[in-house]
Amino acid sequence: MFVAESQLQAAPALEYQNHYPFPLIPLGYAYSALEPYIDTKTMELHHDRHLKTYVDNLNAALAPYPEFHDWSLELLLTQNDVLPDAIQTAVRNNAGGVYNHNFFFSQLGKSPLKQGSILRSDIEQTFGSFANFKDAFTKAALRVFGSGYAWLSSDKLGSMQISTTANQSNPLELGLQPLFTIDVWEHAYYLKHYNVRADYVADFFKLSV
Ligand code: MN
């Protein structure tokens, strides 16, 4: 339906300031929206405390350096070595924390792997089947030792690959474009799934398709 499509395209996208001072971007859905797969309390703590801490620490690190106040999260991560030595580590960790959580929370509200979606079609083409992708992505998520993420990314030629990162690192730092991710820090699942990351990953997939 052409009218509906043009209305969609005309609708203003929600835009948030992508430079200092970085905002705590709202979830865009209720804390309870992901029940029963991710519980309300986990979402409250994950967004309002964990993400907020990364936002606050990033802004605090950048506050004394106005020359970097127009830098985006992407620039702070990919050009991190241009920053003063004194803030490189703090900015890498906290800009990563902000970028990764914004990406993860936004994705959780969208079911990006639903039948017929562009991403799902591309995945099926790359991995042969959605089941193959799910298996490989799950294995990646389970092999992250300690805290980190599993990612589906595309390289500069558009080829998809699955990878993992430790702590708050992310694929942008490796020249890759993130397409899909799971946060496997224990704070993402411990209240509901305790130490059983495999149960969390299975529930995460029920939300994402
Ligand atoms: Mn997290």
Image (spheres, rainbow, N blue to C red):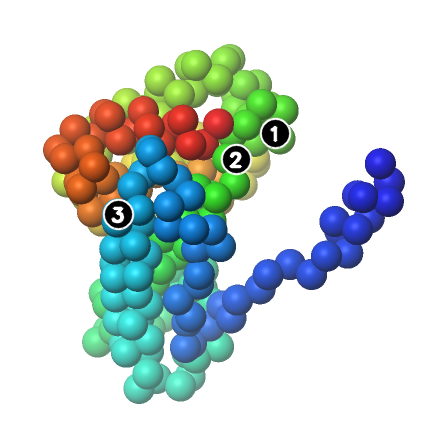
Which residue in the structure is indicated by mark 2?
112
Q: CA distance from mark 2 to mark 3?
A: 21 Å
Residue depicted at x 48% and y 39%: 179
Q: CA distance from mark 1 to mark 3?
A: 28 Å
Q: Are marks 2 and 1 in contact (CB under 8 Å)?
A: yes
Q: Are marks 2 and 3 in contact (CB under 8 Å)?
A: no
- 185 to the left or right of 26: left
Residue depicted at x 33% and y 34%: 36
The answer, for residue 45, to whether it is visible in the render is yes
Which residue in the structure is indicated by mark 3?
42
Q: Position of residue 131 (x, y in %)?
A: 43, 14
Judged from the image, the secondary structure of the residue bearing numbered disc 2 is loop
Give residue 13's quadrant in the image: bottom right
Label located before the other in sequence (2 or 1): 2
Give residue 193's quadrant in the image: top left
**Label 3, ligand 1: CB separation under 8 Å:** no
